Amino acid sequence: MLTVNAYAATSATEPLAPTTIERRDLGPDDVLIDIRFSGICHSDIHTARSEWGPTPYPIVVGHEIAGVVREVGSAVTKFAVGDRVGVGCLVDSCRECDNCRKGLEQYCLKGSTGTYGGVGRDGEPTQGGYSQAIVVAEAFVLRIPDGIELDAAAPLLCAGITTYSPLRHWNAGPGRRVAVIGMGGLGHMAVKLAHAMGAEVTVLSQSLKKREDGLRLGADNYYATSDEETFRELAGSFDLIINTVSATLDMDAYLRLLAVDGTLVNVGAPEKPLSVHAFSLIPARRSFAGSNIGGIAETQEMLDFCAEHGLGAEIEVIPAEKINEAYERVLASDVRYRFVIDASTF
């Protein structure tokens, strides 16, 4: 087994700290990846702090992984040593159920295996990307196109696919009016992607402090939700709203911004339940939906789309010693727009 340096959470209240972990021996279908960059996702913070339920400590989080292939198993055919690759939120699934056969591994009926916090086929807990290297089954490794720098590509493996999937599923494109709630790690990618798809894009943010960034990244309009006039002016305006924030919002107010047959899709995951009044939906045949990342094929499609359109995340690269500081800055919305850890510093 390979021993690598990592950063781990040991409890819900202690800061993340340096440690070492073991990676499984390379199997015939496995790929050993030297991690170059690992993005910091709000999900990492929720998990490290047991905000979504009990966490199996100690845990190494991180599911926005970009790196280079060091070694491949004897049966691997898709990747070779030196390839630029990525790993997202999944490292396995049953591969047999209806959803898996359809390329919807994120909705595996038997439960997919998360990059961290899950249990691998070897029976050991899965540990994520805040580390120097990782061993992943070939079927769950993504190819990062040459047109995207590895550091800017890392957040695409979660923030990118989490927003790309609902935009594609609900047909964002020319003639469609798309609103994005929140201008953060997910929100800024939703703006870039929806604009590249040809939709008319509006950002709904608490304030106007990021307005210049929003317009630069592709938004056509930018409104402050702290201004009550915003909700009166935009009533019935949108075909699709992507809610990227992990906070408890007045969902009824946002649902009333949808046109007839419009859909509000939640990709942010707040700790507390969201309340929705039936009459925010019924009068205009509106839908309130949720969406989870994407399958492996769709994630590869997203990466290729980003390369074709010159898209990557807006990032701030940090050394491992600043992870805990970065967590506090994420919670304070003090990052534009995704922290990425330089894995050489683990």
Image: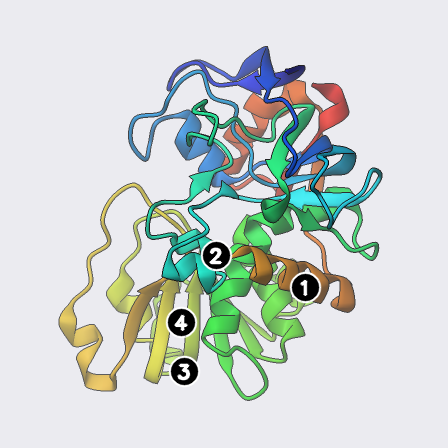
Query: Between tags 1 and 4, which lies in front?
Result: 1
Dot 2, crowdedness within 10 Å: few (<14), some or many (≥20)? many
Secondary structure category for the residue under label 3: loop
Quarter holding residue 206:
bottom left
Query: Between tags 4 and 2, which lies in front?
Result: 2
Give the distance between the C-alpha atoms of the residues marked 3 and 2, in whole angstroms. Answer: 17 Å
Tell me which numbered mark, 3 or 4, is placed earlier along the sequence.
4
Dot 1, crowdedness within 10 Å: few (<14), some or many (≥20)? some
CB contact under 8 Å: marks 2 and 1? no
Q: Residue 237 got which mark?
A: 3
> Vertical placement of 132 versus 316: above or below?
above
Tell me which numbered mark, 3 or 2, is placed earlier along the sequence.
2
CB contact under 8 Å: marks 3 and 4? no
Give the distance between the C-alpha atoms of the residues marked 3 and 1, in whole angstroms. Answer: 21 Å
The residue that label 4 is drawn on is 230
Q: Amino acid at mark 4?
A: Thr
Give the distance between the C-alpha atoms of the residues marked 4 and 2, in whole angstroms. Answer: 14 Å
Q: Residue 217 got which mark?
A: 1
Q: Amino acid at mark 3?
A: Ser
Q: Amino acid at mark 2?
A: Gly
CB contact under 8 Å: marks 3 and 2? no
The residue that label 2 is drawn on is 182
Dot 3, crowdedness within 10 Å: few (<14), some or many (≥20)? some
Quarter holding residue 297:
bottom right
Query: Taking the image as drawn, is residue 335 in sight?
Result: yes
Query: Between tags 3 and 4, which lies in front?
Result: 3
Secondary structure category for the residue under label 4: helix
Q: Position of residue 153 (x, y in %)?
A: 71, 48
Q: Residue at x 41, y 52 (%)?
A: 268
